[in-house]
């Protein structure tokens, strides 16, 4: 990808990750697939599983099972709906869209290196 093209500017349906079989590691593939859900949620306040480019044709509900599980408390609070075809952010959840997207941010959920725990993001509220 050219240096002047940012992946977030591309439509989620165009983000096609490289496959591990051609020498890319799984962490890179996972990072590229993180772009799709976050950009769909930020731009449209919904996530359509069918528009995601998942390697190997894996079902999005399986691929993002951990992230969807992280969103269950927000669904219980009435901020979004989790369905079989995707996620939809309710009107009351739109002000907290950044918090909703954080469920898909692998950097925030990666194990901390040894040493003092540092804040990995700014406060949202």
Image (tube, grey):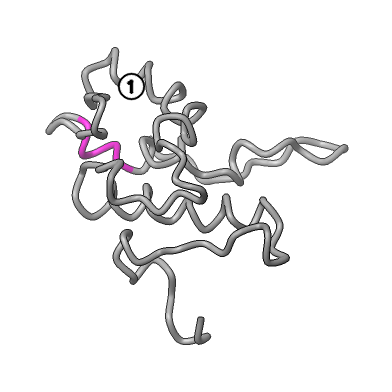
Position in image of residue 64 (x %, y %): 47, 34
Q: Residue at x 82, y 36 (%)?
A: 116
Q: Residue at x 34, y 70 (%)?
A: 10
The residue that disc 1 covers is 74
Position in image of residue 92 (x %, y %): 16, 29
Image side of residue 102 versus residue 78, left or right: right
Position in image of residue 1 (x %, y %): 51, 81
* Residue 95 located within the stretch drawn in magenta: yes
For the residue carrying disc 1, how many other residues have a C-alpha within 10 Å: few (<14), some (14-19), or many (20+)?
some
Quarter that holds the C terminus: top left
- Secondary structure character of the magenta stretch overall: helix
Image side of residue 96 versus residue 66, left or right: left
Relative to 68, residue 47 above or below? below
Relative to 8, residue 107 above or below? above
Relative to 72, residue 121 above or below? below
Furthest toward the top, the residue is 76
Quarter-of-image position of residue 24? bottom right
Quarter-of-image position of residue 117? top right
Q: Secondary structure at mark 1?
A: helix
Q: Residue at x 23, y 39 (%)?
A: 95
Numbered range of the magenta stretch: 93-97
Q: How many marks?
A: 1
Q: Residue at x 49, y 36 (%)?
A: 63
């Amino acid at each position: 990808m050219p240096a002047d093209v940012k992946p977030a500017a591309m439509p989620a349906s165009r983000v096609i990750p490289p496959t591990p079989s051609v020498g890319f590691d799984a962490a890179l593939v996972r990072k590229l697939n993180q772009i799709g859900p976050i950009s769909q949620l930020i731009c449209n306040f919904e996530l359509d599983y069918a528009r995601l480019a998942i390697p190997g044709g894996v079902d999005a509900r399986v691929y993002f099972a951990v992230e969807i599980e992280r969103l269950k408390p927000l669904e219980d609070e009435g901020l979004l709906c989790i369905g079989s075809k995707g996620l939809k952010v309710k009107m009351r959840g739109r002000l907290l869209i950044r918090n909703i997207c954080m469920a898909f941010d692998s950097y925030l959920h990666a194990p901390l290196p040894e040493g003092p725990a540092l804040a990995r993001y700014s406060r949202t509220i």
